[in-house]
Image (spheres, rainbow, N blue to C red):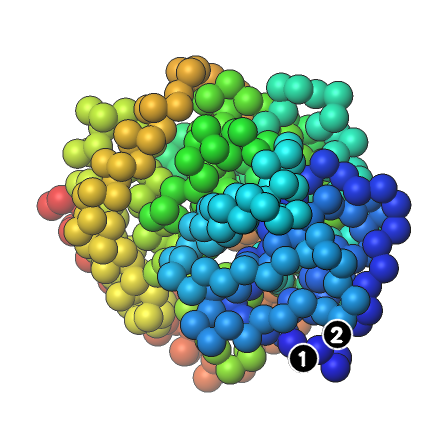
Amino acid sequence: MSSESSPSLSLPGLPGDATAVVVTQGATEYLSRTLAGLAAQSRPPARVLVVDVSRDGGAALPDGAPESWGLLATPGARTFGAAVSEALAQDVSDGGSEAGRTRTSTRWLWLLHDDSAPEPTTLAALLRAVEHSPSVGVAGPKQRTWGEPVRLLEAGVTTSRFGRRMTGVDEGEVDQGQLDGRDDVLGVGTAGMLVRADVWEQLGGTDPALGPYLDGLDLSRRARLAGHRVVVVPNAVVRHARASFAGLRDGDGEPDHRSSFGARRQALLHTQLAWVPLPLVPVVVVLALASGVLRALWRVITKEPVLAVADVTAPLWVLARPGRIAAARRNARRTRALPRRSLRLLQATWRDVYREYRDRRMRRRESQRVVRAPSELELRELAAITRRRRWALGGLALVLGAA
């Protein structure tokens, strides 16, 4: 982001007791809008740290940035959480500066991705929700889409008993306040997360094996088991581009969710192995390997070879790094004050999982419905496809029976 194109900043209102940490991969196309959103806060943070993880150090502060804004470089940081921790360590080490003094006195950390632009009242709403609730350790905003038209992404997340991430939001769903009644949730994402500084230190930040997927959910879950509440604040809003999820970081500008499928699959398997009771770890390992093969066969049938490769290799990548799983289990055990069963009321039931699956299938059928009558050639092609799928399903049934 060049200084010539950077907007000048004016910070209204009184500072909140929070340090905002924005992690960016250089001068991305999203950073200027996110920093402009920070500058427009009705209750601005006491300090803003822009953390550049790129090798070339291309990020820059906008024109007119106040002295409470700082730019730090952490080119060796592998994940979002690692970048935040390294930046905070650098800030503290500068004890004689305003940065060091502000950091040591701040109570809240407001974490932002470079592609998560906050609305003007976001921080004020977050701080208002936690100021009179000392039991809250983590608070998150509602997330909407980056562009127009505005769509709802999530307002807190939960999981099934086996770790399936669920938001309760349909793809492309319009935000009409239907989830504004939510409060306590199992987890929130790191985009816009407000976490108490002592809780961040207690938990050791995010799992170093996770990022950019499921790191916020994992941190939230550990915070809950450490005895802290995790809440979502629906009237606090960030506009999230989800550039990593959509494959926009290194792509050609066209969104492709398949490009991140392998990394998301690895993150899911890692969290499953890190969170299940120890006697069930071998069971999860066997199921992960077997399901990876079966899922890959189905991907081949549905002509998705890229996803088939990811289904097979994801379990192998995770199992090839047992040290990460062991470290995650040790860290979770170190801070745990409540039993795992205390999370069950916040998790989705199997009925919820089935309902989401059924609704998704119904929406897919509606979108694929043909208005005009198919031709005779199309009918023959559909019949041939149906026969091939029946043979393939029969083969899958045999393989599953043998397994």
From the viewer's perspective, tell me whether residue 316 is left or right of residue 220: left
Q: Residue at x 47, y 17 (%)?
A: 342
- Compute the Cα span from label 1 to label 2: 6 Å
Residue 147 image position (x, y, % from top left)? 72, 67
Q: Residue at x 32, y 52 (%)?
A: 266
Q: Residue at x 85, y 59 (%)?
A: 10
- Contact, mark 1 vs mark 2 (Cβ under 8 Å): yes
Q: What's under tag 1, amino acid-wise?
A: Ser
What number is the disc on residue 6? 2
Say which of 245 and 303 sits in front.
245
Residue 247 image position (x, y, % from top left)? 49, 69
From the viewer's perspective, tell me whether residue 254 is left or right of residue 162: right
What number is the disc on residue 80? none
- Could you tell me which secondary element the residue under label 2 belongs to? loop
Q: Residue at x 51, y 72 (%)?
A: 57
CA neighbours of label 1 inside 10 A, class few (<14), some (14 to 19), many (20+):
few
> Is residue 217 at all visible to an observer of this figure?
yes
> Is residue 154 at all visible to an observer of this figure?
no
CA neighbours of label 2 inside 10 A, class few (<14), some (14 to 19), many (20+):
some
State which quarter of the image contains the C terminus: top left
State the residue position of label 1: 2
Say which of 130 and 392 sits in front.
130
From the viewer's perspective, tell me whether residue 41 is left or right of residue 343: right
Does 34 appear above or below 164? below
Residue 221 image position (x, y, % from top left)? 47, 31
Specify the quadrant of the image occupied by residue 107: top right
Residue at the extreme front of the image, as rendered? 96
Q: What's under tag 2, amino acid-wise?
A: Ser
Does 204 appear above or below 8? above
State which quarter of the image contains the N terminus: bottom right
